[in-house]
Structure formats: C-alpha cells, structure tokens
Image (cartoon, helix red, strand yellow):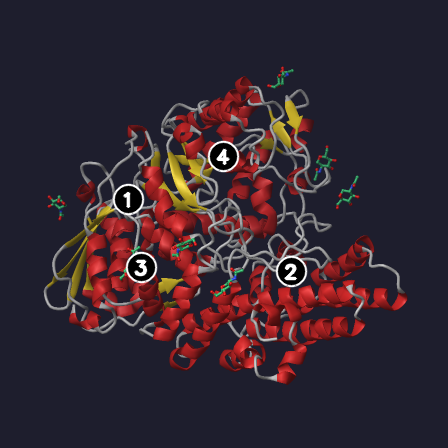
Amino acid sequence: MTMNIGRMKVAELAFLLLSFLGASVSGKVFQTLSHLKPQHRDAVQSAAVQDLLYRLIGDRAAEFQVSVNSSLAAPDGLETYELRSVGVGKVAVVGSTGVAAATGCYNYLKYFCGCHISWSGVQLQVPSPLPRVPYTITVKTPNRFRYYQNVCTSSYSFVWWDWARWEKEIDWMALNGINMPLAFTGQEAIWQRVFLTLGLNQSEIDDFFTGPAFLAWGRMGNIHTFGGPLSANWMQKQLSLQNKIVERMRSLGMITVLPAFAGHIPQGLLRVFPKVNVTRLGGWANFNCTYSCSYLLDPEDPLFQKIGGLFMTEMIREFGTDHIYNADTFNEMTPTSSDPAYLSAVSTAIFKSMYNVDPGAIWLMQGWLFVNNPSFWKPEQIQALLLGAPIGKMIVLDLAAENSPIYQKTKSFYGQPFIWCMLHNFGGNHGLYGKVDTINTGPFEAMSFKESTMVGTGLTPEGIEQNDMIYELMNEIGWRSSPLNLTDWISGYSTRRYGQRNLNAVTAWQLLLTSVYNCTQDWKDHNHSPLVRRPSLRMNIDVCYNDSYLFKAWKYMYLAAPSLSKSSTFLYDLVDVTREVMQQLVTAYYLDIKTAYESEDLEKLMTAGGVLVYDLLSDFDDLLSSQPQFLLGKWLDDASKMAVTEKEASLYDMNARNQITLWGPTGNILDYANKQFGGLVQDYYAERWSLFLWCLIESLNTEIPFHQDKFNQAVSIVEKEFIYNGKKYSTTPTGDTLDIVKNIFIKYHPENVKDNNYLKLKMPYSYMKKHKFL
Ligand SMILES: *[C@@H]1O[C@H](CO)[C@@H](O)[C@H](O)[C@H]1NC(C)=O
Ligand SMILES: *[C@@H]1O[C@H](CO)[C@@H](O)[C@H](O)[C@H]1NC(C)=O
Ligand SMILES: *[C@@H]1O[C@H](CO)[C@@H](O)[C@H](O)[C@H]1NC(C)=O
Ligand SMILES: *[C@@H]1O[C@H](CO)[C@@H](O)[C@H](O)[C@H]1NC(C)=O
Ligand SMILES: *[C@@H]1O[C@H](CO)[C@@H](O)[C@H](O)[C@H]1NC(C)=O
Ligand SMILES: *[C@@H]1O[C@H](CO)[C@@H](O)[C@H](O)[C@H]1NC(C)=O
Ligand SMILES: *[C@@H]1O[C@H](CO)[C@@H](O)[C@H](O)[C@H]1NC(C)=O
C-alpha cells in the first residue's frame, strides 16, 4: 500500500476501501434470464483476460494471477471478483466471469497503481513491485447486466473500424465491467443470403441497403438506398470482423446481443410475393419516399415468420448465439394503428419469430419510442406492446433514463425487466456535457423503486470517443450499490488520468464537474454552439452551464500545462477544454454580429465578423489539428481504407463526409452528427460563416434586407461543395498544442484582455460585458 500513498490522498484510500465492501442486492430475480451467461469454460475466460492484460501492460501481466471461477457467483448469479496479494509482488484476481476478472484487474490498476484507460488515451505507469492488497477485497455488482451501445453507435463511431480498433474496444468493455454489448457488425451479409433465398435479385438487394455510414437507420427501416450499395468486399470484411468480434466477446464471458427481424422488408419482396400484406410507413426525418417510407410486413402474415425464421437460422449458423436479440419495429416510426390488439400482435409475432428458432430467445428492445413519441405511446399502447411477449422474455432498455426515465411512468415496464441506461450523447457530437448527479443517484433510485424490475445499468450513447470522464463514472456506478462522493472521485480521476497529482488540474476538474458536467435540466444535451450550425439571425445559444466556470477551468488547465505536457491524455483534455471555450467565443462573436447588423453598424459588423472568420476559426482549426483525436483526415482515411477499388473509396468518402455534415442528400438532418474536427472547421464551418457575413455586409450596403431563405439556398451549395471537394486532409497531427493553446489563451482569456486595450478592440461586446471588464 505504501507505493500508493504518494499517488493518492489517504481520504481517497479510505473511501476506496469503503466502496469495496460487498453490495446488498435488491430488485427482482428473473429465472427466465438465468441462461444468459458465458458459454465458455472458466479456463477459456481466464486465458482471455490474461491475454488482455498482456495487450495492456506487456510482460508485467505475468505478475497477475488471473483466474475465473464461475462458482464464486453463487447463489444469486451476480458477478463478483476478489483481489489479494500472493507471494512476492504478485496479485491474484479471481472473477466469477472473464468480465468480472477484467473489471477486478482494472480496479486494481486504477485504485492501487493509479492507472487510467480511456478512449482518448491510457496512463499505465504500473509501479514495481506491484502494490500490496492489504486483505482480500471482494466486490460484487448488484446488476445482472451492464449493457453497452446504442443501435446508432455502429454508424456514428464503429463504421470504419478494423479489427485492431475493435479489439481495443472489447478490451475497454471488459475492463469497465460491461457484459452485454450489441454485436451488430456484418448483419447485412446474412440478410443478403436470406433475400437471395427468398428470390430477390442482386439489384433489388443493392437498392435496399444504405451505404456504410447509414446502416443503423437502414436496419431500423428509417431509410433505404442512400449512400449504397454495399460491395461484396464490404460484406466479406464485415462478416469476418463480426466472427472475430463475437468470438472475442464470448471468450471474455460477455453475452452478445444479435439482431433479429423487426418487420421491415425491401420493396423487391413485393415483386416476389405480390399478395403479401404490407403497410408503407411514412417518410422519416425530412426524407421523402425516394430514400424512406419503408415497407412493414404485417406481423400476422405468414411471410413474417418465414423471413424471421430464415434470418435467425442463418445468423445463428454463422455467428452462434447467446440467446438475446434486438429488434425495434417502431423506432422513430409511428405505427399505422394505435389499437392495442394490433400492437400486441406485432410484438407477439416478433417474439415468436425468435422463439421458433431459439426456444431460449430473449428479446431486447430499445425504449426510445416511448421517449420520442409520447403522444402516441400512452399507457395502453405501451402495455400492449410490452406484454405481447411473455413476462421475463423481453428486456427493455430505458434508453435515456438520465433525462426521461420511463420505468416510473409504466409501473416498471408493466413487469418486464429493464436496464437503466445513460444515453448522454447524440450523433457523436463533441460538446462537454454530463449529468453527474443524476447518474450518481438515478440507478439506485430505480433499483429501489416499488416492485422494481431493473436488471442492469447501461451506456447507450449514439457516438463515443468524447467526454471520457462521464463514461468511466457510469461504468463504475454499474458495479456499485450506493452513490459515489463525486468531489473525491473527480480528484482521483484527474490524478490517475495524468499520472500525477497536480493541484491545478484537480481544480480544473472540480470546476468542470460542477458546471459543464452538472447539467440539471432535462434534454439540454450536446452543449452545442452556433459554430456547428447553419448561421441565421435566430440561433440557439443555450448551453447547460455558466461559462464563467469553464473559463476558470481553462485557466487551471493552462497553468497545469507545463507540468503535464508529457501526458497525452492531458494534451487531449487541454485541447478539449480550449475547444469548449472557443465554441463559447463563437457564440459571443455571433451575438456581436447580430447586434451590429440589427443596429446597422457596418464597422462593428466587419470587426466582429473579421475576427471570427479570419482569426478565431483559423486558430480553432489549428487547435484541433494538433491532436490525433480531432482530425477530419483520420475519419476520412479510415473510410477509404475499407475500400479495394477507387469507386468504392469515393463512395465511402462521400458517406463519411455526408454523415457529419448534410446527413442525407439535401441536408435532411443537417449537422446532426456535427464534429469539431481540424479540417472541418476551416473548410465547412468557416466557409459557411464567411458567406453569412458577406451576405449581412451586402445587405447593409445595399439596404436590401437579409433573407434567410436566399441565404440557405446559397449556403447549401457551399455545404455540398465540401462533400465533393476531393481534398486530402492530414491523418497526423500538426503544430504544437502547447504553443497553440498559449497563443489562444493570451488572446482571449478574460484576465489577459482586461488590461490590454489592443485585445479589447477585437473582443465581442457581450463577452466583455459578461466578464465585467468593459
Ligand atoms: C471456486 O470457488 C469455489 C467456491 O468459492 C471453491 O469451493 C472452489 O474450490 C473454487 N475452485 C477453484 C478451482 O479454485
Ligand atoms: C431484378 O429484377 C428487376 C425486376 O424484375 C429487374 O428490373 C432487374 O433487371 C433485375 N436485375 C437483375 C440484375 O437481374
Ligand atoms: C393486413 O393487415 C392488417 C393489419 O393487421 C389487417 O387489418 C388486414 O386485415 C390485413 N389484410 C389482409 C388482406 O390480410
Ligand atoms: C425526394 O428526394 C430526392 C432525393 O433528395 C429528390 O431528388 C427528389 O426530388 C425528392 N422528391 C420529391 C417529390 O420531393
Ligand atoms: C465528500 O468528501 C469530502 C471529503 O473528501 C467531504 O468534505 C464532503 O462533504 C463529501 N461530500 C459528500 C456529499 O458526502
Ligand atoms: C450540481 O448542481 C446542483 C444544483 O445547483 C447542486 O445542488 C449540486 O451540488 C451540483 N453537483 C455537483 C457535483 O457539483
Ligand atoms: C456565473 O457564475 C459567476 C461566478 O460564480 C457569477 O458571478 C455569475 O453571476 C453567474 N452567472 C449566471 C448567469 O448565473
């Protein structure tokens, strides 16, 4: 333990030991779910965790004795692990599953070695010899399942991943205690076989599938065709990836969730089966029927069971199964009838199509529809849909429980088991955001809710690789039976993340915790700024925090920089916090531009606009370009790497660019999946702002009022040009992050501007007023 004292405060240690005391378990136990468990023998799982440790810390892994003993989980089957010191400098980790053992390893690495693992980087200076564990520590999770992924994550984040990146992610899942991930890769290859069996020809199939970046919405029946077709190369690559993915997940003791048939069919099937009973759904999210309005097979049509059965059989033959399947029929789609009998028939048919092939089938359903369309989904409709499957044979994801928990409004999903999920992120956007207090208490409230049917916690972000902290926190919550002391926790987080205790960094994190990460309003997500939106004179500038705290946190990060400049996770955070500050500055300039225009002050308009477009956004792009996680070039390069022909490469390039900008052929959900990437700020956002300014200046000069519609038409050309600009973007960082941040800090931090008349001339009025240095 002595090794540790240098790294951690005594109070943190005491708190840690307290948190390790066994969990008391409440909530209902569903015997119907007892077969959802690892399939591999204990020895296979132990070997998989040992291999994971070697990937993580190389030869130091030999100092860990990892084993899996499934009988540790008796009698209630809840996963558990034990940590103790054995022999000289060795640590034994025993888990009831591979995931439990991996979680034990990471907790030891975190809380005894001061290490850290995240999407943006790792800090793995493992002390030698390994710090002693003073006595056997036993940790048990109160949650049967720790679920991971949103059906959209496959498109927003995983779409261009190769096996190396997947392997890292599966390791991250295991280390963070996740035992139930979606395994959605490669399902189109299975569908293709099924459609060919049913008599479709290749061009009808090609017409149906969307391109790679839009598969999530093709799968849910929201859209078809757009961005496609899928090549044979794509199919083959994804199939072989998926085989590796499910094998690795299972070897670590995870329960993989595979897709099932939800009822959406290609138009071509109407040619083969002209008498089939289908309804045509409406257009989804500003899409017309060219790429939307999918066909939904009537659940009582015999073809429903036939297609469902063929798909399940073929998929299980190819990938095996862990007996749990996801199907979402009405995700963001209004059913054609609100008759409870109809809704119940739909879910009965869906469940039956799983059960017919796999009698052990459990149906996992996203509860998003109840959040998204509450005017349709009244208690009667919800109950009918949920109870169409036998009690205990369906698990509902309370998908955005940190904002709109549904379990409270539905008597705990009318008896069906559910998982409390933090959605947190939409479209993989970059804004700093979180609801720390809610996630620190929400799951425990749900667990002790009257006749609670909660069986787990989960992460359901649409996109990942942002806001590392909030995901680490939520993953820890999944293994706890009471809330954390967040003040203590965040200070330990900062210390582990940077590999040393730095008071400036700790202070910065405390400030972030109580501001950007402590959103207390519902549905104030994203923390967007006008930066990533199409300019207009009526932009939403709300964020869910008081940005004085952000500017303070920025200063402390800046002060920490000289001591932490060797830490890659620190440099990432420094850029991320500076990025958040700069998006707030964009808001300030926007307000100045608007005021200047409205008061017809051409000079002020030109000053504010000029600084925004030529100075701030250019610095912004340089900032992002200096760190590997913020590069447009990487996103585009990953896409084209999946291709084997030029034609394919250019289709993937279009997919990759379109998703993060226009999202659809005509900007259908424009900028929904916006990213703050180096390259994108300069060539997309700044271009747009520049045109906006030009139009405003022109309007003042000519005295012809600014017309939003006309501007929209003009700017849509600029937006489309980005998709096909053919430009190559760097795949490696450029510039020195510290120099760039320093330059920005000197130019824009309120304390520097305060006494500098030259800087003041360039500062937005709203900003100076807010920071009280006019
Ligand atoms: C597994 O755990 C059980 C219960 O604690 C114990 O009786 C058994 O000896 C363990 N098996 C091994 C191989 O350690
Ligand atoms: C597929 O079938 C459609 C409808 O019969 C036909 O128009 C098309 O030419 C066929 N495509 C192929 C590749 O056979
Ligand atoms: C088609 O399905 C609808 C909805 O279930 C049903 O009302 C209708 O009777 C069916 N039509 C035929 C021809 O079976
Ligand atoms: C539907 O959308 C497509 C693709 O964007 C477009 O080409 C077509 O004109 C639209 N059709 C109608 C009727 O608006
Ligand atoms: C958290 O712990 C600190 C001491 O580290 C203590 O001052 C504070 O009151 C605790 N907060 C809560 C909410 O218990
Ligand atoms: C979050 O804000 C609420 C309301 O202002 C406050 O009561 C709470 O202590 C804050 N939580 C944290 C972790 O700062
Ligand atoms: C933001 O926080 C600062 C510093 O605590 C405070 O002076 C200011 O009034 C707050 N602003 C708002 C809008 O609450």
Spot occupied by residue 14 in the image (x, y as percentages of width and height): 19, 60
- Check disc 3 and report the residue beneath it: 52
The label on residue 40 is: 1
Instruction: Quote the CA–CA distance across marks 3 and 2.
Output: 43 Å
**Which tag is nearer the camera, tag 1 or tag 2?**
2
Instruction: Quote the CA–CA distance across marks 1 and 2.
Output: 51 Å
**Which tag is nearer the camera, tag 3 or tag 4?**
4
Q: Are marks 3 and 1 in contact (CB under 8 Å)?
A: no
Residue displayed at 63% across by 45% down: 210
- Check disc 4 and report the residue beneath it: 327
- Check disc 2 and report the residue beneath it: 530
Q: Are marks 3 and 2 in contact (CB under 8 Å)?
A: no
Location of residue 498 with respect to 46 vertically, above or below:
below
* Image quadrant occupied by the N terminus: bottom left
Q: Is residue 180 visible?
A: no
Q: Secondary structure at mark 3?
A: helix
**Which tag is nearer the camera, tag 1 or tag 4?**
4
